[in-house]
Amino acid sequence: MKREELIAPERYNVVSEMEKYAKETGRKALLWLNEQGDQKEVTYEELMKNANKIGNAFLEQGLKQGDKVLVMIPRLIEAYQVYIAALKVGLVVIPSSEMLRTKDLQYRISHGEVSGVISYFPYTDQFHGVNEFDDLITFSVGGAKEKWRDLDSLMDDHSEELSLADTSREDMAFLSYTSGTTGNPKGVVHTHGWGYAHLKTAADKWLAIQDGDTVWATAGPGWQKWIWSPFLSVLGTGAQGLIYQGKFDPKKYLSLMDEHEVNVLCCTPTEYRLMAKVDNLSEYKLEGLHSAVSAGEPLNREVIDTFQKHYDVTVRDGYGQTENTLLVGIMKDMEVRPGSMGRPTPGNQVEIIDEMGTPVEAGEVGDIAVHLDTPALFKEYYKDPERTKMSRRGNYYVTGDQAKKDEEGYFWFEGRSDDIIISSGYTIGPFEVEDALVKHEAVQECAVVASPDEVRGNVVKAYIVLQKGFEGNDELVSDLQNHVKELTAPYKYPRKVEFIQELPKTTSGKIRRVELRQKENVMK
Ligand code: ATP
Ligand code: MG
């Protein structure tokens, strides 16, 4: 695919992709389930009609094209309807996870100059402490009180006809805040044209969605990953999306896949990892599954092997950021090299560069960078020209992650630039050590960081959460160290090991190595 094929028509609205399917009577759009066993289904036609009613309600209540709205709705069909409605009338959506608290909301509402809020009723109280609250146009779903407009009943008063706002491909569609793994979240500006580029990049060859497929992408609304997969890729290809509003449980996930004959699965590495550790995997068949992908953090080889062995499916890795779309990935039908996250996605110019901004040779570690001329890249950090500038080097946007490329152009992830460990002059990516550690039967999860050391500068330290039934003692420590020495270059083994109950994580579940590193520095 050429770069040109990722560029949307000049006048473009990302909802136009979904409207095509709403014209087909009976095409299934979403199947929602919860822990209690309740179910609800909608077709594309119903979904669009509901979205149209909501869009009309937004306009009538005073929101207008270009305004920004913050949406905080969990895994419900209503989340899809509200996003479609907002985009269709030309509003900019700020995705927000239900895990955000008043302080996080305050930051987004002030920084994003928000005009309206659409929240799920049980979460509305979180907004009451926000300074601008009285000036916001607020809607709530699933009940309403006080100044919150009841969106469910407002829908009944509005027409199911609504035309698409005349938006340009350059108009902002989403203002997405990053996960905050390394610091304060950054406001990332994405246009309708970015939505188009994303669909072309990720839906077809990576998720490999075929007509008639049921797709389960487990990300929750509020994260960019939800926009990527459950929202844009599912609805933009006319597939049926499965929504499960329940807490993560590896066995439950596996049985849902059997029950609903899931064809395409998109999960986080943590979810895969915990599924792969289930003891009775052969009880699940996953017969419909023809495509399984992972993104967000590095994918362990162990997972790939286990899924291959039990279900004859290759879990394929993909790398991207809130700032862009899928940049590197193992596309369907591409040869897998376990441990590698794949090759640059078609049409996107992704390189590994040095400090001077020059692409490096195969085998050399450098910064993963994206040519600024890439349609799948964000426009800028909102109201933060300084940060936008700092993220650029020559003609490239620098991702903040490091990798090396092999002769065939496969990328091998080293780590976030800040997470890389330099010990006795060796550069060690934490992932390789973690990957070896999780292969050990005693290890449930782990994170590897630099720990300051007078002689070596730093040494490798592993924080480990043990599987049930194992005890963290000296014998296990040396057993784990030997295990790593056998699987990787021996100098990478963790000289220090600490057992902990839980790893520090972001609300989206990413390991915050920065916190562990700080702990090491304080301890010195
Ligand atoms: P912040 O920028 O606020 O610190 P964040 O970078 O975690 O948070 P996201 O945009 O959600 O926010 O995550 C993108 C990052 O996740 C990438 O820069 C990379 O470090 C990591 N990542 C994503 N996919 C992969 C993958 N397949 N393999 C390894 N790392 C990945
Ligand atoms: Mg980031």
Image: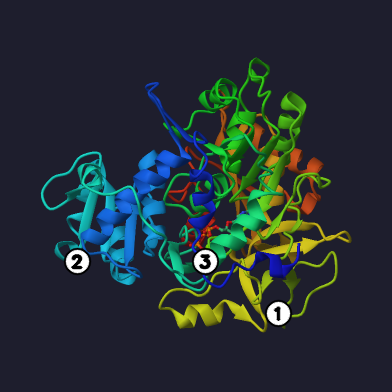
At which x and y percent is residue 303? Answer: 69, 36
Residue drawn at 57 percent across, 29 percent down: 467
Residue drawn at 21 percent across, 46 percent down: 157
At which x and y percent is residue 365? Answer: 76, 66
The CA span between labels 3 and 1 is: 38 Å
Q: Nearer the viewer, residue 495 or 414?
A: 414
Amino acid type at mark 2 = Glu
Q: Give the mark toward the camera: 3 or 2.
A: 3
Residue 105 vertical position relative to residue 500 in the rendered view, above or below? below
Residue beneath disc 3: 12
Residue beneath disc 1: 355
Q: Give the mark toward the camera: 3 or 1.
A: 3
Q: Secondary structure at mark 3?
A: loop
* Residue 348 seen from this side: no
Q: Nearer the viewer, residue 410 or 518?
A: 410
Disc 1 to disc 2: CB gap under 8 Å? no
Residue beneath disc 2: 132
* Residue 257 seen from this side: yes
Q: Secondary structure at mark 1?
A: loop
Farthest residue, direction left: 146
Q: Give the mark toward the camera: 1 or 2.
A: 2
The CA span between labels 1 and 2 is: 43 Å
